[in-house]
Amino acid sequence: MKNPWSWVPTLYFAEGIPYVAVMTIALILYKQLGLSNAEITFYTSWLYLPWVIKPLWSPFIDLIKTKRWWITSMQLLIGAAFGGVAFTIPTPFWLQGTLCFFWLMAFSSATHDISADGFYMLGLSQHDQTWFVGIRSTFYRFAMIFGQGVLVMIAGNLQVIFRNNIAYSWSLLFYGITGLFLALWLWHSYVLPRPKDDAPRKGVTADTIFADFIDTLKTFFQKEQVVVGILFMLLYRMPEGLLAKVSSLFLIDASHSGGLGLSPQEYGFVQGTVGVIGLTLGGILGGIAASKDGLKKWLWPMVCAITLPDIVYVYLSYALPSDLLTINVCIFFEQFGYGFGFTAYMLYLIYYSRGEYKTSHYALCTAFMALSMMIPGLFAGALQELVGYRMFFIIVMIFCSVTFLTASLLKIDPEFGKKSEEE
């Protein structure tokens, strides 16, 4: 058996990079290439779709090849998608070309997620699975910092070197990521173990999988508080769904357009580094709090944490500070609150998924989770262009009432989430 340290960290680093590229780097790329905020948020929000419909094809993966094969194949395909983005950026059809390859990247990334998480359980003993849970999460966060932070800063530095040739600089960056992913593909082709249980499922057909999926859907929608549960999954993050993409565009938009005018280097540090650190620390603290006293006790503090710190964007849109310290403090505060409050959301998905089909039900919950970000994002940019950044952030604060309303409808077992019960 291969040493898990040789493949678990790099596998989850490889899982995070394409997701960050599709969801964050694409925003900065398109903004610098001249798309409007409405176009950027509309096009990139559709890229959530593979994660929304992921439960539809995830059961079929085991019918054809091993999870190991899917991992290495998807990494090669993701590398090709990065290369395709790099190639098409300097061309006249850059928008159609890059979107096409971002779509390929998104579907490949979602498939890679399914395979990697399944392979993790097959390739490690039960003890090692527990031990490496924190390691895999840490390296996924490293991928976020590397993608949103380091790579965006590199793109900014390339623009300085090549005298503000934006298209050429981004193209070079994506060629570099292509090389990185080809290296990851070669590494994992060599180092990933070959568990004997990692084999195509025998005696299972597409018909039986389809029948099981129908049963899963029926039981999912027959659960107690199903309407409230789905509303919570879709609406708890409504403010964040509006804010997520527009906040990044606000940070880099020019001051005459109402933005803060950060350079890619500054954005990479503020949002991609300081923000991700705040998000991570908030999530860790939220997990510790909920494991001690349970979800029910911490629900309302977490609701407040995921909503009220959004007001920093109202302040930033009025004050338009130029010093990075103020901006960093504000972004850290908002992201820390989001990380802390997001814990309640993830725990509720686990709570709702309890029962006979808990794995399949949890997959459906994550589809609603992706949908909760996709739908608001589709029109967030258009709304911002209609009312301006200041009024948009005020509207986001008004929508925080939706989070409070949906949380008030929940009925949660007071013991759920406590450490003693989980053990």
Image: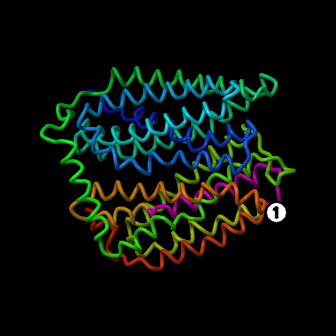
Residue at 64 percent of width and 65 percent of height? 309
Q: Which type of secondary structure does the marked residue at label 1 adopt? A: helix
In the image, taking residue 277 as reference, residue 344 lies left or right, namely left
Seen at 26% across and 31% down, the residue is 65
Residue 192 in which image quadrant: top left
The coloring applied to the image is rainbow
Range covered by the magenta-colored residues: 316-345
Q: How many marks?
A: 1
Look at label 1 and name its amino acid.
Answer: Tyr
Q: Nearer the viewer, residue 152 or 115?
A: 115
- Residue 253 coordinates in the image, percent (x, y): 78, 47
For residue 310, what is the image quadrant?
bottom right
Seen from this angle, which residue lies furthest left?
Answer: 203
**Place of residue 88 in the rendered image (x, y in percent of width and height, measured from the top left):** 63, 25
Q: Residue at x 51, y 64 (%)?
A: 341
148 to 422, vertically: above or below = above
Question: How would you classify the magenta stretch by its main secondary structure?
Answer: helix
Q: Is residue 132 above or below residue 354?
A: above
Q: Is residue 6 left or right of residue 166?
A: left
Question: What x and y, as percent, mark residue 221?
Answer: 31, 67
Question: Where residue 1 appears, x then y in whole percent?
Answer: 23, 28
Q: Quadrant of the C terminus?
A: bottom left
**Residue 35 falls within the magenta-colored stretch:** no
The magenta stretch spans residue 320: yes
Q: Which residue is mark 1?
A: 318
Q: Residue at (46%, 69%) from the top-left corner?
A: 232
Q: Is residue 18 left or right of residue 319?
A: left
Q: Quadrant of residue 244?
A: bottom right
